[in-house]
Image (cartoon, rainbow, N blue to C red):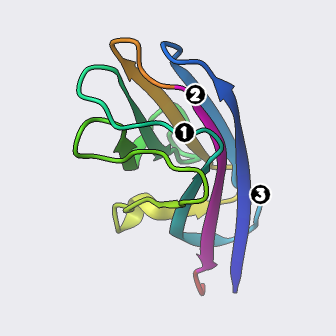
Amino acid sequence: MLEAIALHIPTTAAGTADTWYLPWPHPGKWLLKKAKFAPATAVAAGATDYTTVTLAKNTIAAPTTWTDIGAFNTNTGATALVIGTTIDLDLTEGAGCLLSEGEQLRVTKADTASGDILDGTWTFLAEKVPV
């Protein structure tokens, strides 16, 4: 069985770091298979002013400990954000991508120099793990 869940990122100005949290609502164990981001504002890649976006998760046993499971940035040679082009995040495989009800996904925006604007929608796809 597959389940999808979305997280909207409201407009966050360049030079503004921010963090968003998404609780996993489905009972049982789930393996995060895909994380996709659809930007709502175009951003060119840049060498001096850029944004790094990191996806992490926690566990019920250690709710204040976060494991990074994917990231992208708008640094030169990296990822420009183009409206109509979906970013397919490369996920770290393994136990870090397992989710249980009540655990959370965290999206963090960190800017270098003055950074970039960030807004759009994340979609996460997970597959139920047989018990």
Q: Secondary structure at mark 1?
A: strand
Instruction: Kindly identify the residue that appears in the image at 68 percent across and 28 percent down.
Output: 11
Q: Amino acid at mark 2?
A: Thr
Question: Residue at the spot x=41%, y=58% of the render?
Answer: 96
Where 112 sits versus 94, above or below?
A: above
Q: Nearer the viewer, residue 64 or 124?
A: 124
Choose top left, top right, bottom left or bottom right for residue 95.
bottom left
Residue corresponding to mark 3 = 25
Q: Residues within 10 Å of mark 3 (few under 14, many from 20)?
A: few
User: Which kind of residue does numbered mark 3 sit on?
Assistant: Pro
Magenta residues span: 117-128
Disc 1: which residue: 107
Is residue 83 within the magenta segment? no
**Marks 2/1: CA–CA distance:** 6 Å
**Residue 110 position within the rendered picture, expressed as x and y whole percent measured from the top left:** 42, 24
Disc sitting over residue 75 in the figure: none
Q: Secondary structure at mark 3?
A: loop
Mark with earlier residue (2, 1): 2
Q: Which residue is mark 2?
A: 19
> Dot 1 surroundings within 10 Å: few (below 14), some, or many (20 or more)?
many
Left or right: 65 as drawn, with respect to 118: left
Q: Quadrant of residue 91?
A: bottom left
How far apart marks 1 and 3 lie (CA) works out to 17 Å
